[in-house]
Image: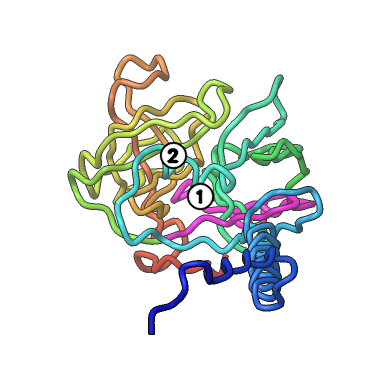
């Protein structure tokens, strides 16, 4: 049977808005919650903000040890500068003599050249941080031109040097001292010779010295001679100058650290000074 032409189907109803449909409202709500959670996570993870606390930083430690790898001159200086002191010694004569010393033990004992403090009525130590302290001679060896000093007070941070290590001809070395009153002067060179003998007008000869060509001058005496691992291999005691002008011409001498300590070659540990 044919359908009458006047009988047409009713048009489909228009879809309801999304806010009237429970299924769509639920999806939109879930999406909004997810975006809010993501925003909170980003705020927490990104750095910044005055209220955010920084993790505690480790304080510097005064526990020196020799380097496993060769150091540059600048690195040796940075490592050893806190261990080097200026010595002002006032003797029976006019004026004051200046020299250098190196902190050689955890109790603050200072190693230096004996002639720097010989006959002094008073001795003052100036540390790398600028603080000063009176000091007194504890032990001395005129034969080796070596003395140890005990300061009256210690700096806030005490950094003893690492003692030990041998020296071979051609090894790189660094000297740190106070030549001509120029504090914390650093020079570099090589070991030029070993087992040298220094003749002196008084006190007899000193044998077994390290010869080096890092520049030193009056005021450098008592300072450390260092290898490229930052170890003190010797204590500077003299320079050679045939003109008697007392200025450096390329030949300096240091007492090997083993002889300065009185036994062996040294093993890098704090000595029983």
Circles 1 and 2, Cβ within 8 Å, touching? The answer is yes
Q: Position of residue 64 (x, y in %)?
A: 52, 61
Kindly identify the residue that appears in the image at 33 percent across and 32 percent down: 214
Q: Position of residue 238 (x, y in %)?
A: 40, 34
Kindly identify the residue that appears in the image at 40 percent across and 56 percent down: 257
Quadrant location of the C terminus in the rendered image? bottom right
Distance of label 1 from label 2 (alpha carbons): 8 Å
**Way the structure is coloured:** rainbow
Q: Residues within 10 Å of mark 2 (few under 14, many from 20)?
A: many
Q: Position of residue 190 (x, y in %)?
A: 25, 38
Q: Can residue 152 be found in the magenta stretch?
A: yes
Count of numbered marks? 2
Quadrant location of the N terminus in the rendered image? bottom left
Q: Position of residue 90 (x, y in %)?
A: 72, 31
Closer to us: 72 or 234: 72
Point out the residue furthest to the left here. Answer: 170
Circle 1 sits on which residue? 146
What are the residue bounds of the magenta stretch? 136-163
Q: Is residue 158 above or below residue 179?
A: below
Q: Is residue 47 left or right of residue 186?
A: right
Q: Is residue 141 above or below residue 246?
A: below
Kindly identify the residue that appears in the image at 31 percent across and 47 percent down: 209
Kindly identify the residue that appears in the image at 53 percent across and 21 percent down: 180
Q: Is residue 104 left or right of residue 32?
A: left
Query: Element type at marker 1?
Result: strand
Closer to us: 158 or 249: 158
Name the quadrant containing residue 100: top right
Circle 2 sits on which residue? 237
Question: Mark 1 or 2 closer to N-term?
Answer: 1
Q: Is residue 59 left or right of residue 165?
A: right
Closer to us: 248 or 160: 160
Query: Element type at marker 2?
Result: strand
């Amino acid at each position: 049977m044919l359908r009458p032409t006047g009988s047409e189907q009713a048009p489909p109803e228009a879809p309801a808005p999304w806010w009237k449909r429970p299924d769509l409202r639920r999806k939109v709500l879930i999406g909004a919650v997810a975006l809010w959670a993501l925003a909170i996570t980003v705020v927490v993870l990104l750095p910044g903000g005055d209220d955010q606390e920084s993790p505690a930083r480790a304080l510097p430690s005064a526990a020196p040890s020799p380097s496993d790898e060769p150091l540059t001159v600048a690195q040796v200086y940075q490592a050893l500068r806190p261990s080097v002191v200026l010595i002002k010694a006032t003797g029976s004569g006019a004026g004051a003599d200046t020299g250098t010393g190196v902190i050689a033990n955890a109790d603050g004992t200072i190693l230096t050249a004996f002639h720097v403090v010989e006959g002094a009525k008073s001795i003052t130590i100036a540390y790398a941080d600028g603080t000063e302290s009176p000091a007194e001679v504890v032990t001395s060896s005129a034969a080796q031109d070596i003395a140890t000093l005990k300061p009256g007070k210690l700096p806030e941070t005490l950094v003893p040097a690492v003692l030990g290590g041998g020296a071979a001809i051609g090894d790189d070395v660094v000297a740190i001292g106070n030549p001509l009153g120029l504090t914390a002067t650093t020079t570099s060179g090589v070991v030029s010779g070993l087992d040298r003998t220094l003749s002196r007008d008084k006190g007899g000869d000193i044998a077994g010295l390290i010869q080096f060509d890092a520049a030193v001058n009056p005021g450098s005496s008592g300072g450390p001679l260092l290898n490229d691992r930052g170890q003190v291999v010797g204590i500077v005691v003299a320079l050679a100058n045939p003109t008697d002008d007392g200025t450096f011409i390329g030949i300096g001498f240091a007492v090997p650290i083993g002889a300065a300590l009185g036994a062996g070659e040294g093993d890098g540990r704090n000595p029983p000074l």
